[in-house]
Image (tube, rainbow, N blue to C red):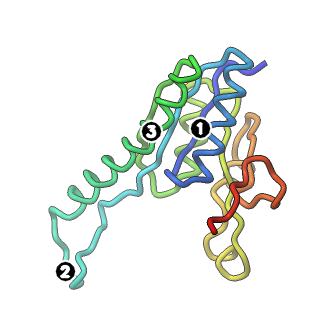
Amino acid sequence: MFKHILMPTDGTAHSERAIMRGIELAKLCGAKVTGIHVLPDYRLAIADDGSFDPGLPGKMQDEGRARAENFLAYVKTTAAAEGVACDTVIATNSQPFDAIVNTANERGCDLIVMTSRYRKGLVSLIMGSESSRVLHRASIAVLVFRGLMSADHPDKSLPAR
């Protein structure tokens, strides 16, 4: 069925649940997976006081890369635990959906598995949804796991008392 699955991650619990499900699917299909995290383009970063610090973009890039490696380590360890072949990519792009779709095309992926978080009102209008943008731009199948689950969903953990 599927041979190569791309799994974007932002390090959230929602994203980790989608990765777990994507790796389960990959195992069933005998597919390999590629985890991806997209870093923003920090070249135009401005310091807190409004001045331009030429070293700031490099510092921000290094911190972002460290976080990305941490997020992608989860993909690697989860895939390894299930015996699924895994590769990871750290991309830089001001539009994460572009990097996701471009990476899927470049690597010959036939499925993108990602999460979508529910946003309300003005926030949804301003921020939009990366998963929606990927859905509209991708030429391959996209499987989206909702970040908001019903109370009786098996993945929904009980609230702490």
Secondary structure of the residue carrying numbered label 1: strand
**Disc 1 crowd, CA 10 A, few/some/many (<14, 14-19, 20+):** many
**Disc 3 crowd, CA 10 A, few/some/many (<14, 14-19, 20+):** many
Residue 148: % across, % down: 74, 61
In the picture of the structure, the residue carrying the numbered disc 3 is 72
Residue 26: % across, % down: 67, 24
Q: Which residue is at 49% across, 51% downward? A: 11
Question: Residue 148 vs residue 76: left or right?
Answer: right
In the picture of the structure, the residue carrying the numbered disc 2 is 51
62 over 151 or under it: above or below: above
Q: How far apart are marks 2 and 1 (CA)?
A: 37 Å
Secondary structure of the residue carrying numbered label 2: loop
Q: Which residue is at 59% across, 51% downward? A: 97
Three-letter amino acid code at disc 3?
A: Leu
Which of marks 1 and 2 precedes in the sequence?
1
Which of marks 3 and 2 precedes in the sequence?
2
Three-letter amino acid code at disc 2?
A: Ser
Q: Identify which residue, 43 or 62, lies in the foreground.
A: 62
Question: Residue 158 vs residue 80: left or right?
Answer: right
Q: Which residue is at 73% across, 54% downward? A: 156
Secondary structure of the residue carrying numbered label 3: helix
Question: Residue 94 vs residue 118: left or right?
Answer: left
Q: Identify which residue, 75 or 82, lies in the foreground.
A: 82
Number of the label disc, if any, that sits on residue 140: none
* Dot in front, 1 or 3: 3
Residue 32: % across, % down: 60, 20
In the picture of the structure, the residue carrying the numbered disc 1 is 7
